[in-house]
Image (cartoon, rainbow, N blue to C red):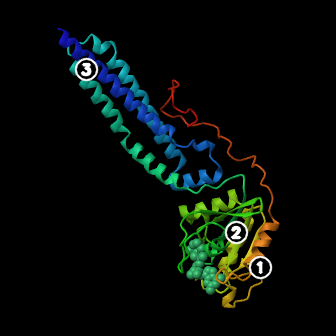
Amino acid sequence: MQKKMNKDRANEEFVRAVSSSVHDRLVHVIQSFPILDEQPPFYRDTVEALFGIEELKKALGSVGWAAMHTKRMGWEHGGARIRWAEDTAAVRKRAVARIASIVHQIDDDLRFLNEARNVLRKLPDIREDEFTVVIAGYPNVGKSSFINRVSSAEPEVASYPFTTKGVIVGHRYEGRKRIQFVDTPGLLNRPEEERNPIEEQAISAIIHTANLVVFILDPSEYCGYPIEDQRHLLETIQARVEVPIIIVANKADLGAVSEAEFSMSAQTGKGVKEVLKAVLSHYREPAPRPDEGAPEEETEDRPTVEGGEPGLRSSR
Ligand SMILES: Nc1nc2c(ncn2[C@@H]2O[C@H](COP(=O)(O)OP(=O)(O)OP(=O)(O)O)[C@@H](O)[C@H]2O)c(=O)[nH]1
Ligand SMILES: [Mg+2]
């Protein structure tokens, strides 16, 4: 009799332990995810371009739902039901099977969130409180070569377009001033709806993070693109941003003439100092961006976390 009671108690505890450890793991998945509504616009745009914010919120919602039901299984099966049951081993089995089935239902969501988290972890840390200079232009014009010369960033430089595939951040100290340089992937002059996520990330960095844009042209056209197309892209960017734009003709060593205000060779270094001086003349302590980071109204109807599940963040 005593032996059976011990077994029954072990079964009861087993159900509660499984329920609570699965529940805690699921809550941890949610809590280790950044609260998307509280992130700056560049981050949100990137998440939107790469994964879709609504999709991520839905997946998080499903995990919240699973956490809640897993806990409920623990209460329902690990409490009075198992204590008064004839066959506690059967109740235990049923409870574990139900929990496994709940987790199985959110398998795809967990995979999706895991993949997203791994990518988001590697996103560049663009600080909002630093004067930010974004380098923009067509592919292969020498953006990364320039940023290599003037900042701590060491982006790859290569003789083919689309070398830079994500936004890269470097810094430069001028006395006590800290300047943040952002290298962006090359952009083509094409309609917004045709842009891929990498280009969207570049555009978002230009629009949301720049205090100053350095737009690089390659009048030698060694980059592989006509100067008119490069100029059209410049016009598109001029229409989209309110911050000052410094226009620089690069590859001066190749001898092409340009009416751009600045001319340099990122390869030989000639003219780079003058561009840097112009950049510094625009320096100011960045004011906080009042419109940014404000949480949006929550309108969606999610199948989850009602009832104030402890440990779950209600903002998603
Ligand atoms: N001759 C000459 N070549 C240059 C100069 N600046 C860059 N290059 C070359 O142009 C090619 C492209 O340079 P990158 O700095 O990778 O250009 P990017 O604009 O960052 O290119 P993406 O990342 O592909 O958009 C490389 O082969 C560089 O060595 C320059 O001033 N003169
Ligand atoms: Mg590059």
Q: Amino acid at mark 1?
A: Phe
Circle on res. 91? 3
Separation of marks 2 and 3 at Cα, in angstroms: 66 Å
Foreground mark, 2 or 3, reads 3
| Rendered location of residue 78, percent (x, y) | 33, 19
On-image quarter of the C terminus: top right
The numbered mark, 2 or 3, whose residue comes first in the sequence reads 3
Secondary-structure class at tag 3: helix
Foreground mark, 1 or 2, reads 1
- Residue drawn where x is 73% and y is 88% of the image: 257
Write down the residue under mark 2.
236
Q: Is residue 104 left or right of residue 48?
A: left
Label 2 crowding class (10 Å Cα cut-off): few <14, some 14-19, many 20+?
Answer: some
Does residue 25 lie above or below 142 as drawn? Answer: above
Residue 225 shows in this picture: no
Secondary-structure class at tag 1: strand
Q: Amino acid at mark 2?
A: Thr
Furthest-bottom residue in this view:
255
Secondary-structure class at tag 2: helix
